[in-house]
Amino acid sequence: MSFQRATLTIGDRMPQHDVSRQPEPPPRSGPQQGRHQAPESGWAAIRQTWSDPDRWIGIVVAAAPGLVFVAVNLVASLYPAITAAAVTALAGLGYRLARRQSPRSALIGILVVALCAVVAAVTGEARGFFLVPTLIPFAVIMACLATIIARRPLTGLLLNRVTGGPPDWYRNVALRRVHLTATGAAIAINVINATVQVIFYERDDTVVLAVAHAATGPVFATLVAVTIVAVRKTLAAQR
């Protein structure tokens, strides 16, 4: 789920690519290079992604419900923590609407928080709040593997429109190779994430679970940004 949310937020804010245009020459360095200039390398994409304060705010908004849940549970009890997490998720949606931003990622976050709250309430355990986030990496791994087997890697399905790739991108050997690499990286990240969350779920360590869940946002946002640049460079080299 974090991968999909990162795709929505980064994809919406990365400069759009027009495949009908010839590649423009690299921009001159200097103060006149705009913040919305398309990055020329993976490192430039990473710097551009995290130089935008709105992205940091988005990460905080996404991570806040879990962190608030843990904090309130430590000082109060389970049900006040559930209420606080729900209120925080709704506040995040209100913040996005007030700034006239796309509410999609916030709505996905509210759905996840609602599922987490239901599980925590039913189980009566604080760690139950993190059962759904612990299971999500396994679902993403399965989705990645299924799309690789189908020869349509997941990042291609999610990012082709954003990058301006052709409708039959999966028939393009170079493009498919880029998306195979990116989807493989997503699998590796989710394997690590799943391992960490399962270990600490068994240990009933909600603090580490909240931190691990919050950390997936920046990691996948970085992967998405680098993938977009790699695809666009591949497209430019083929023209």
Image (cartoon, rainbow, N blue to C red):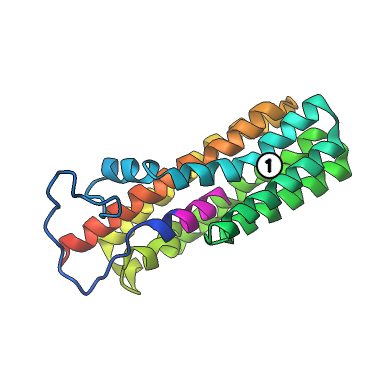
Element on which disc 1 rests: helix
Q: Residue 151 at what x, y percent from top left?
A: 41, 63
Mark 1 closeness class: few <14, some 14–19, many ≥20 residues within 10 Å? many
Residue drawn 75% across and 52% down?
114
Q: Residue 49 at what x, y percent from top left?
A: 37, 45
Quarter of the image holding residue 235?
Answer: bottom left
Q: Which residue is mark 1?
A: 65
Position above or below: 83 against 8: above
Q: Which residues are magenta?
A: 1-9
Position above or below: 118 against 125: below
Q: Is residue 88 left or right of residue 212?
A: right
Q: Pick out the residue farthest to the front.
A: 98
Position above or below: 221 against 96: above
Residue drawn 25% across and 52% down?
34
- Frontmost residue, 87 versus 161: 87
Q: Is residue 224 in view?
A: yes
Residue drawn 20% across and 49% down?
33
- Frontmost residue, 205 versus 73: 73
In the rendered structure, does residue 3 fall within the stretch colored magenta?
Answer: yes
Residue drawn 32% across and 64% down?
16
Q: Residue 83 at what x, y percent from top left?
A: 81, 43
Q: Is residue 221 left or right of residue 78?
A: left
Q: Residue 172 at what x, y percent from top left?
A: 28, 66
Q: Is residue 169 left or right of residue 137?
A: left
Q: Amino acid at mark 1?
A: Pro
- Frontmost residue, 232 versus 57: 57
Q: Is residue 185 in view?
A: no
- Frontmost residue, 28 versus 175: 28
Position above or below: 176 against 219: below
Q: Main secondary structure of the magenta part?
A: helix
